[in-house]
Image: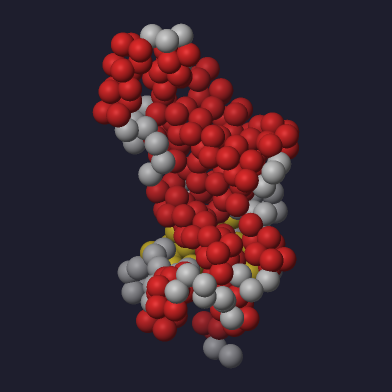
Amino acid sequence: MSDHDNIDFILEGWEYEPTTVNARLVQGDDGRDVIQMRVDLGVLQMETSGRPDGTRPEGFESVLERLRARVAEKGTEYELTEEECFDIDREFVQYYHRRICWLQLRRFEQAIQDADHTLGLMDLCRDHSPDEAWMLAHEQYRPFVLFHRIQAEALVALEEGEGAEAAVEVISLGLERLAKLFASYESTEAFEDDDIVRRLTEIREDIRERYGIGKTLRERLEAAVADEQYELAAKLRDELARRNFGPR
């Protein structure tokens, strides 16, 4: 074993903190940036684009893209094989690790992209799973992935100058999306008590208070429609369309 095989110098210089995500961007010898994540027993290293492990399954950028191509070829009734389910499980874990690192590093656009990738994998599981229990094992995390995505998009709005009102709208639309999801699970009553819903609501109201945001444009539109102020509602609708608040 050569000196290069031993990573003691990395571990000794980077103490593991169990209460947070230990992530950093470093530059490799070839000049490319990679993400490193300190875990209890060592360090994970991930690529910043494509699959986190840097592989190209059968020439595709990811397992998700490979399987989307297979479904397009075989038809919507295609059923995933046991090996494909295993490949999906691996990709879920990889993109989870990188997503939480992006969030910790405040790289919110990248976190959104990786959340969308995971949601795409969940859609594939839902539509083509050979085993309902396996599908549900992944589907149960959809609200959690959406939480990361909504939070990241709201922070993008705050950091890139779209403004606090846009951030509030992003969270409100995200909460509506979650409400529909809970309804599809026939768990409407659980929505109000869910920790993710409560946390997003707290973040939204904190932004309102911190930035002095009253009723947003969309909330004013809803009030105008409820009060049958249709001329005002039309003007507000036009303004809302110009601002184009909504999911990326």
Quadrant where the image shows the N terminus: bottom right
Task: Identify the residue at horizontal 48%, vertical 70% (top origin).
Answer: 76
| Image position of 229 with respect to 117: above or below | above
Residue 193: x %, y % from top left: 73, 33
Left or right: where does residue 37 sit relative to residue 232? right
Q: In which image quadrant can residue 68 be found?
A: bottom left
Q: Nearer the viewer, residue 172 or 166?
A: 172
Residue 71: x %, y % from top left: 45, 73
Task: Identify the residue at horizontal 46%, vertical 51% (top origin).
Answer: 111
| Image position of 55 with respect to 121: above or below | below
Task: Identify the residue at horizontal 45%, vertical 74% (top origin).
Answer: 75
Q: Nearer the viewer, residue 137 or 182?
A: 182
Q: Nearer the viewer, residue 104 or 186?
A: 186
- The answer to whether residue 102 of the structure is visible from this angle is no
- The answer to whether residue 199 of the structure is visible from this angle is yes
Residue 40: x %, y % from top left: 69, 64
Task: Identify the residue at horizontal 47%, vertical 27% (top origin).
Answer: 168
Left or right: where does residue 160 sit relative to residue 190? left
Quadrant where the image shows the C terminus: top left
Rendering colour mode: secondary structure
Left or right: where does residue 49 sit relative to residue 241? right
Residue 181: x %, y % from top left: 60, 44
Q: In which image quadrant can residue 228 be found?
A: top left
Label count reads: 0
Q: In which image quadrant can residue 125 be found?
A: bottom right
